[in-house]
Structures are given as structure tokens and as C-alpha cells.
Image (cartoon, grey):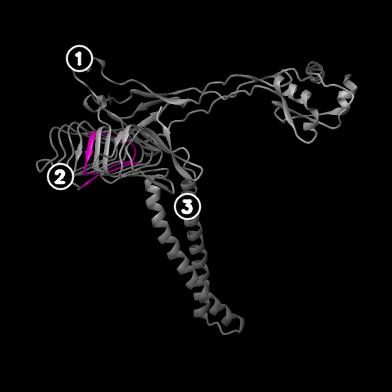
């Protein structure tokens, strides 16, 4: 078939990015056969030389009438990719000579036992530049350049300085690097306790990083603007950190106290404790009968990797080796929403109710005053009251709308739970309750190596690979 006939018969539609071509028929010549090679030559005559989809072109030739009212892709280019983003690269500040451990010694938290001290003026971090992505090629054979990744920037905290070029960060004081909420980089002075936090030492409240080379006993409090690093264990104490908390031992709290960090928490085990982290909670051995809340993930996959009893809440997911036990101890695993937002949701309900009631009372009072104004019965005092109520109404309405927007954001998170999972590497026992967003599933029978995720309105089980 000649190109003139094909031109009158075929409609070609090219996407705006020139990466896709669709074919449909305007008319079909019954007396003619459509041949793949002839069609491809026709496309090439139109400049479409890259990414021809031979199988689709054959489908068109075998049954052209099917594509009178339906489009089919006949060419596909290769999109350019975006390069890797830049990132903050920390300089290795460890004293290499002091890292001498016996071959049989296992060090899980080197940065606790071997502190990363820095001195004033020392380079602590640099910006790795973004990379350019791989080029692509459109259907006309034109090269599409790859795009540059996102430029990284320092989030400057306390006691650090950045050079004029903005690509290197230095310590402004002697101290310890600490990353706090919102990824701010700080160098904090260090307060070190050489032993237990007990009656001899008392409570600790320090603007920088706190290092405790011993245990924190029941009833005591340790607060730090930076990290808290403990070479020992924690009993029923209160620990509050603006950065991360690392404990070489475990937390055995007997239901008392609170361990709370704006970022991550790492420890060996958790028993009868209340633990809250804005980021990840990483536990090497076990989590027993505890209330654990993580803004991101709870990871319990070390030697034992056991979770039994209590409640585990994590925004992004939970990974463990074993969940529950043969005695069907009640254990709840909840993922899909940041637990802090879950608490905020309850608080917002009360706030919205209060603002709505205040707004209703204000509007009713304004109706009465407006009626008085329309009949000329508004005194100077009542006029002042009316103006004040109008300001109050606007302020209350603004607060109400703000609370409703925050609630909508949380509701949106509850709906967007597809990425959150509960992964069990060994066994999950009956008696465990899995909650993903708004959805709940009770485990009745022992199951091995499973991933639980939300799909099509229910929590489904998939094999752990």
C-alpha cells in the first residue's frame, strides 16, 4: 500500500514529550492488506525511527478494524532519568588507633563505647554533589539529556559553621556530633557520667549530649538537648533526648518511666517499658510486654528478634523474627500511621468540638446584636461588644479551619497505608492483632514467614521472601 493511502487511512498521535506514539484508523481500505514492514516504513517516513513496537504493529495488521475507535501504542522512546540527589557526607572522625577490640568481642554500638569526638575547627561534613541522570531518546531519535539530581543543603544546628561556598561544615566547639529533629547537624558539648545515674549523681539535665558509663536507675531523669548514650542499662527512669538514644544494654522498666527520643532509639532489649521515637527503634534481642511507638520503623531482627505482649506502633512498618508465643499472649502490632499523629487525631477531635461550640455561641450572640443594630437599639457598649465578637468569630474560624486541615492530613495518612507492612521472618502466633491504618486482622493460627500488608480494603498475607 502506498504512503498516500496510508496517510489518509492512519491517524498518528505523538505525546507532548515525544516518547510515545499511538495509532488509530480514520478509514480502512478493505481491498488492501496491511503489512508490518510497510507500516514501519511509513512510520519512518514520518520521522518515527526509535522504539517501534513490532508486536503491536503486527496486531494492527492482523485486525485493523479493531483500532477504528481504539488507540494502540506503536512506538516508545526511552525517558531520560534523573540523577542521584546530592547528600550530606560525614567525615570519619573516629580515632582509628583506639579501635582495638579482641577478635571474640562483639561491638554493636561502637559510637557509644568509642565516642566520635571532634575539636573546634575540625571538618565534620561535606556536601556530595548531585549527579546527572542517564540520557534518553525520543521516538524521532533525538537524544534527551539526563536531568540533574537535587542539590543537598546543610541543615545547620548549634555550634557548627559552614564555609563561604556552602559545601563544608566545621565544628565551632569541642564536642560530639549530634543530629536532632528535622535533620539538624549540631556539635554539642558533652556531659559525661562515669558510673551509674543514682543518688550520688542525681537527675541530669544538659543542653548538649549526655554520656553515661553505667546504668540509669529507677526514678531518675536524664534530659539532653542532643543525644543520650548509655554504656549500661536503663531501669524505670525517664530519658528525653532531642537527638537519638543508644543503650548498649537493655531497658527493664517494670512499667515505670519513659524513654523518648526525637530521632532514633537503639538498645539490646526492651521489657515492661514505654518507648517513643520520632524515627526508628532498633532492638537486637526482644521486646516484651511494652508500649513501643516509632514514627518510622520498629526493627527487632537480631539474635532473637522476638516481640511478645504489649503494643507496637510504627508509622512505616515492623520487622521481627517472631511475634507472639504459644500461649497466645495478646500482642498488638499497628502500622500505617505515625503513632504521634494518632494521638494528635484524638486531641484534634476535642479541639474541633470546642472551637465549633465557641463559634456557635459567638454567631448566636452576633445574630441578636445584628438585629438590635438594624433597629437602631445598639448602645456604645453593645457596639464595642459586637466588634469584639466579630474579631473573636474570625479568630475562632481560623483556628477551626486549621484544626480541620490538620485532621484531613491525618485522615489522608490513614487512607494511604499501602507502603506500611508487618514482616515476620520466622513465626507469628495466634493471639496477635495486626492493625494497618483503619483495618484490623486477628491471627488465629500459627503462621510462618509472612508479610502483612493492606490491599483492596483488607489486610492480606504474602510469603516473606
Check if residue 264 falls in the magenta segment: yes
Please state the horizontal and vertical placement of residue 157, each as a whole percent of the image: 37, 35
Q: Which tag is nearer the camera, tag 1 or tag 2?
A: 1
Q: Is residue 71 left or right of residue 293?
A: right
Element under disc 2 = loop
Q: Is residue 388 visible?
A: no
**Placement of 332 over or under 356, stated as above or below:** above
| Residue span colored magenta | 256-277
- On the image, numbered disc 3 is attached to which residue? 406
The crowding category of the residue bearing disc 2, from other C-alpha atoms within 10 Å (few below 14, some 14 to 19, many at least 20), is some
Disc 1 versus disc 3: nearer the observer: 1
The image quadrant of residue 126 is top left
Disc on the earlier residue, 1 or 2:
1
- The alpha-carbon separation of the residues under discs 1 and 3 comes to 53 Å
Pick whichever, 368 or 9, lies toward us.
9
Residue 460 in sight in this render: yes
Which residue is tagged 1? 103
What residue lies at 88% left-to-right and 22% top-to-bottom?
32
**First in sequence: mark 3 vs mark 2:** 2
Q: Position of residue 180 (x, y in %)?
A: 35, 37
> To which residue does mark 2 refer?
218
Q: In the image, is residue 353 above or below residue 465?
A: below
Question: Would you say residue 310 sits in the magenta stretch?
Answer: no
Question: Which of the 4 quarters of the picture holds residue 82?
Answer: top right
Structural distance between the alpha carbons of marks 1 and 2: 35 Å
The quadrant the C terminus occupies is: top left
Q: Position of residue 319 (x, y in %)?
A: 35, 34
Amino acid at each position: 500500500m502506498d504512503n498516500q493511502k496510508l496517510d489518509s487511512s492512519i491517524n498518528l498521535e505523538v505525546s507532548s514529550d515525544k516518547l510515545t506514539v499511538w495509532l488509530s484508523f480514520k478509514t480502512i481500505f478493505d481491498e488492501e492488506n496491511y503489512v508490518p514492514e510497510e507500516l514501519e516504513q511509513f512510520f519512518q517516513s514520518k520521522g518515527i525511527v526509535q522504539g517501534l513496537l513490532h508486536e503491536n504493529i503486527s496486531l494492527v495488521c492482523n485486525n485493523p478494524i479493531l483500532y477504528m475507535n481504539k488507540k494502540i501504542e506503536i512506538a516508545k522512546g526511552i525517558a531520560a532519568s534523573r540523577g542521584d540527589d546530592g547528600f550530606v557526607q560525614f567525615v570519619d572522625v573516629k580515632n582509628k588507633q583506639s579501635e582495638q577490640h579482641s577478635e571474640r568481642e562483639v561491638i554493636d554500638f561502637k559510637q557509644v563505647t568509642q565516642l566520635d569526638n571532634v575539636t573546634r575547627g575540625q571538618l565534620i561534613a561535606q556536601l556530595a554533589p548531585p549527579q546527572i541522570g542517564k540520557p534518553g531518546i525520543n521516538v524521532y531519535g533525538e537524544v534527551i539529556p539526563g536531568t540533574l539530581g537535587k542539590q543537598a543543603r546543610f541543615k545547620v544546628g548549634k555550634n557548627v559553621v559552614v564555609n563561604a561556598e556552602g559545601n563544608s561544615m566545621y565544628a565551632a566547639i569541642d564536642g560530639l556530633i549530634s543530629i536532632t529533629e528535622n535533620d539538624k547537624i549540631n556539635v554539642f558539648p558533652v556531659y559525661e557520667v562515669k558510673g551509674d545515674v543514682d543518688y550520688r549523681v542525681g537527675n541530669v539535665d544538659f543542653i548538649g549530649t549526655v554520656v553515661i558509663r553505667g546504668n540509669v536507675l529507677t526514678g531518675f531523669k536524664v534530659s539532653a538537648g542532643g543525644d543520650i548514650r548509655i554504656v549500661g542499662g536503663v531501669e524505670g527512669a525517664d530519658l528525653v533526648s532531642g537527638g537519638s538514644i543508644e543503650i548498649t544494654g537493655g531497658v527493664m522498666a517494670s512499667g515505670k518511666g519513659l524513654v523518648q527520643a526525637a530521632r532514633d532509639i537503639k538498645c539490646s532489649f526492651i521489657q515492661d517499658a514505654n518507648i517513643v521515637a520520632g524515627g526508628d527503634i532498633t532492638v537486637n534481642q526482644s521486646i516484651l510486654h511494652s508500649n513501643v511507638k516509632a514514627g518510622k520503623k520498629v526493627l527487632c531482627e537480631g539474635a532473637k528478634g522476638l516481640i511478645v505482649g504489649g503494643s507496637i506502633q510504627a508509622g512505616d512498618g515492623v520487622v521481627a523474627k517472631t511475634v507472639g508465643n504459644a500461649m497466645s499472649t495478646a500482642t498488638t502490632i499497628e502500622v500505617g500511621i505515625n503513632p504521634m499523629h494518632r494521638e494528635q487525631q484524638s486531641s484534634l477531635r476535642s479541639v474541633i468540638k470546642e472551637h465549633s461550640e465557641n463559634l456557635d455561641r459567638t454567631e448566636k450572640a452576633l445574630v441578636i446584636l445584628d438585629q438590635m443594630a438594624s433597629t437602631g437599639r445598639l448602645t456604645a457598649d453593645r457596639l464595642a461588644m459586637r466588634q469584639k465578637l466579630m474579631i473573636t468569630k474570625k479568630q475562632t474560624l481560623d483556628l477551626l479551619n486549621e484544626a480541620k486541615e490538620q485532621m484531613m492530613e491525618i485522615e489522608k495518612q490513614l487512607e494511604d497505608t499501602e507502603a506500611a507492612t508487618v514482616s515476620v521472618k520466622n513465626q507469628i502466633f495466634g493471639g496477635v492483632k495486626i492493625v494497618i491504618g483503619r483495618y484490623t486482622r486477628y491471627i488465629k493460627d500459627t503462621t510462618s514467614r509472612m508479610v502483612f500488608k493492606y490491599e483492596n480494603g483488607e489486610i492480606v498475607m504474602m510469603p516473606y521472601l
